[in-house]
Amino acid sequence: MTKKVGIGITGGIAAYKMADLVSKLKKNDIEVIVIMTEAATRFITPLTFRTLSGREVLHDLWEQHDEWKVKHIGVAEELDLLVIAPASADFIAKMTYGLADDLLSTIVLATTAPVLVVPSMNTNMYLNPVTQENIEKLISRGYRFMDPDTGLLACGVSGQGRLPEIEDIYEQIINLLNPPPQDLQGKRLMVNAGTTCEDIDPVRFIANRGTGKMGYCIAEEALKRGAEVILVSGRTHLEPPPGLEFIPVWGAEEMCQVMRERQADCDIIIGAAAVGDFRVAQAADQKIKKTDDGSQRLVLELVGTPDILKTLGASKQTGQIMVGFAAETEDVLNNAKKKLKSKNLDFVVANDVTMEGAGFACDTNIVTLISLDGEVVSLPKMSKQEVARAIIDKVVSLLNN
């Protein structure tokens, strides 16, 4: 049965971004009813959303529609989910105090469907104690909220208040429409992510191109499905998902030590971090100076770092599931199969990082799941959230066998 989502758009510069969300929902066979406040129509016209959604856009409380006897009640009763995005400070305040002076606010009061609120506004307005108190009150009443992103805002300042990425809002909508199964309830999963860093001196270090996106997506997916999650993270710009145990680390040796200490407590271990293979044999105590003419040469002696998954694999417990990644540039399948056996893994996630859409610092991946029993499953290009879902699905199937 087709799901029906109401997209409530309030007055904010981010209103134009909702065109992408409506289009994405419609392409994925979700019926969309767009409800706009009068202020929202100043930023983007209803005609845009009528074209994208394939139906009339609602914005006038008093306009009659043959489809519903009482419009705001009829719409409210039809919805499987109501999304308010962007949600302005003014509209959040109206929701808090039950004001209903336009079509969208009356629908909010009348609906019994879940409501997802996505704030977007100036940083000072968002962080204002009044706005924060209003948000806390609404959360206590069962409204779902997404935190705004941090970055450069339309007003010229940089801070928290940006509308989250449309892909992230879409994922939240899908999760609310189709709640993920709680098939990891009672399980503890540890995943590493990000890049490890090895010091050259107090200023410089060796790292790699890993961003942590894949590991963080795995942690988030496991959380959604009921697992208790430990995220051991090297360097990354990402914020850890709320609700997990977060352990930041710097180098490979520290990451290995932390994971060894926690291994016995875990049912599932997934190695998604971009762990550096080498470290400087002797890091300098002080910053290494260069000559004025830049003519000197610096020769670094590198030594190997611990193979974290191999170390953990040697201590693997009965019933413990271990998963690794094989980021390769050549002979991908054969190299991945070698890692699978040498590290005592249950399956390995292999990818060719030279392929477009499958390397570091992108939002997609193209992977092949190679199992210990010889099964090879090649997946098409997917978002990293979808890849994480496939990996957890595979873990669950192993748990159930």
Image (cartoon, rainbow, N blue to C red):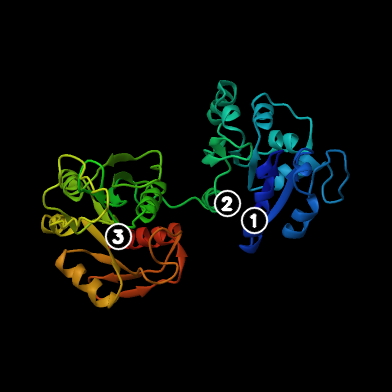
Q: Is residue 2 above or below residue 63?
A: below
| Residue 373 visible to an observer of this rendering | no
**Looking at numbered disc 2 in the image, what kind of residue is underneath it?**
Ile
Q: Which mark is residue 297?
A: none
**Looking at numbered disc 1 in the image, what kind of residue is underneath it?**
Asp
Structural distance between the alpha carbons of marks 3 and 2: 35 Å
| Mark sitting earlier along the chain (3/2) | 2
Q: Secondary structure at mark 3?
A: helix
Q: Which residue is mark 1?
A: 20
Structural distance between the alpha carbons of marks 3 and 1: 39 Å
Q: Is residue 242 above or below residue 79?
A: above
For label 3, count other residues whose C-alpha is less than 10 Å away and answer few (under 14), some (14-19) or many (20+): few
Q: Which residue is mark 3?
A: 400
- Residue at 45%, 72% (x, y): give it: 380
Residue sitting farthest toward the front: 293
| Mark sitting earlier along the chain (3/1) | 1
- Do the CB atoms of the residues marked 2 and 1 lie less than 8 Å apart? yes
Residue 222 shown left or right of residue 1 in the figure = left
Q: Which residue is mark 2?
A: 166
Residue 281 shown left or right of residue 155 in the figure = left
Structural distance between the alpha carbons of marks 2 and 1: 7 Å
The picture places residue 361, in percent across and down from the top left corner, at: 41, 58
The picture places residue 104, in percent across and down from the top left corner, at: 74, 38
The picture places residue 152, in percent across and down from the top left corner, at: 55, 41
Q: Is residue 86 above or below residue 1?
A: above
